[in-house]
Image (cartoon, rainbow, N blue to C red):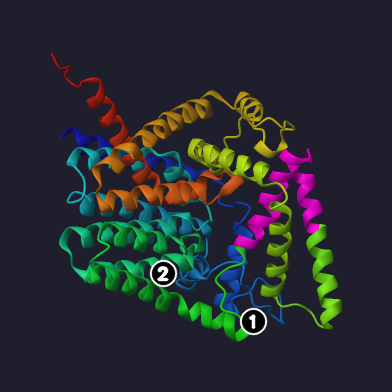
Amino acid sequence: MIFAVLVGALILLRIGLFLYFIMIEGQYMSDDSPMYIALANNLLEHQVFSTSIQPPFEYDVFRTPGFPAFLALLAYLGMESFYWVSFWQEIIYCSCIWFFYRYSLSLFDEKIVKAGVIFLLIESGGFAYPKLILSEILFLPFFMASLLLIGHYLKKLDWRYLALSGFIMGLGTLVRPALLYFPIVICLTLIAFDFSSKQRWLHSGLLLLIIAVTVSPWLIRNQQHFGKLFISGQQSNMFANYHVPIMWESAKGIPFWEGQKIIAHQVDSAIKQQEKQQGKALTLIETYKVQQAIAFKELVQYPEDYAKQWLFGILKTMMGMNLTELYQTIYVQPNRVHFFDIQELNFFNKVFKFLKAQDKFVLLAVILRGMIAVFALLGALAIIARKDCFLWIMMLANFYFICIPGPMGYSRFRFPVEVFWFIQAYFGFIWLMSYWHKPTQQ
């Protein structure tokens, strides 16, 4: 009864905040929104995946088609206002909460599931991202469903759950290509827990095959237009425009924004040189390959600094609160300093100066995130000790999405696993309590 009343009250809070967002015509644009919108417009008006303003349309391969197709569909149905996007994203998010409650009860203890539902209803990213033109909310149901289906596959040993998980995971990859490598982690874990089973090897191969077939139309499209099977240029962009400048800031003392200008100039010069040598313009994919090669060449020169910045980025991802995104959407703008604007080489001093510039609610959110992170790390020890295949996959999913942002430390990458990260923290808290209350032997 208490749970139902609390859930009802929090849903009313969500509805009230959404109505307030619409009433004040809140901000739905982020830095990445214009590209998504351009892709959606061209899909709808010209049936081409491109960010070009007018013909001739240059085929794009930086983004994947999932989220732009969602935007285009809503516009096709007459919901052209981006507040309609926010409305449907709110519906999708609330549906994910219901789905989690409905299909997690057979995988976790009821108390854990109910705590997870409350967490999803109050999590700041869950308030913020439905209001933004970003792929986060559309990606969430694909990832959540595919992971829970893995759990049901292990519980019921029915390959059809795994097959459906593979199909949904493939669709999720077309929304956010960051998911691309995680199926390999799943398969290795499945095999490690039942190495001698031929059936487990067969099922793992089936999972990868279904994912490959699901994403194959996009890969074939890129093969036809660019001559290469290619998923997305985002990886190359991240290494060159983010990893290298952050590493330079540590190794050379070059400010982050200045480092971005320098690496962009190096990439541009290398592309022009290759085009001159080949006597033709490089394709978009070829430019990404050049970009990535230059980035790797720089990163390997300072392995210690790069590893250190990657570790700091993981800490930043774990501690990120997503509250500033919520502030952005409803025009609440406290005194805020961008993390990369702070000219400080020592990471911990930089964090201190960053936090000092935030308001008390952001600081409270950081403290809560820090507590969750500590308990989640303890939860990893508890999960490892339990030797439960699904819990291992869940734990690896948490660390996968926390680690892949690398040195940038983007908390939005962690958003798909928020509830599972919370569950891992719950395991850590229970483990700690049981350790403290362990009866002493006489």
Which corner quadrant holds the C terminus? Answer: top left
Q: Name the residue nearer the viewer: 278 or 120.
A: 278
Q: Gap between marks 1 and 2, in whole Å? A: 22 Å
Q: Nearer the viewer, mark 1 or mark 2?
A: 1
Q: Position of residue 433 (x, y in %)?
A: 25, 25
Q: Residue 171 carries which label?
A: 2
Q: Residue at x 27, y 67 (%)?
A: 162
| Along the viewing direction, whichever of 51 and 429 lies nearer the viewer | 429
Residue 337's place in the image compared with 176, above or below, is above
Which badge, 1 or 2, comes first in the chain's sequence? 2
Q: Residues within 10 Å of mark 1 (few under 14, many from 20)?
A: some
Q: Where is residue 209 in the image (x, y as percent from the top left)?
A: 37, 76
Magenta residues: mostly which secondary structure?
A: helix
Disc 2 residue type (three-letter): Leu
Instruction: Reply yes or no: does residue 241 show up in magenta.
Output: yes
Q: Residues within 10 Å of mark 2 (few under 14, many from 20)?
A: many
**Residue 222 part of the magenta segment:** no
Q: Which residue lies furthest to the bottom in this view?
A: 224
On the image, numbered disc 1 is attached to which residue?
226
**Marks 1,2: beta carbons within 8 A:** no
Up the image or down, 413 lies above or below 54; here it is above
Instruction: Please tell me which residue is depicted at 53% across the width and 56% down the height of the picture.
Output: 133
Question: Does residue 163 show up?
Answer: no
Which of the image's four quarters has the N terminus? top left
- Give percent across and percent down for residue 226: 64, 81
Instruction: Report the side of 24 relative to 248 (left or right).
Output: left
Residue range of the region highlighted in magenta in the rendering: 235-264
Q: What residue type is labelled 1?
A: Phe
Instruction: Residue at 34% x, 46% y: name it.
Output: 420
Q: What element carries label 2?
A: helix
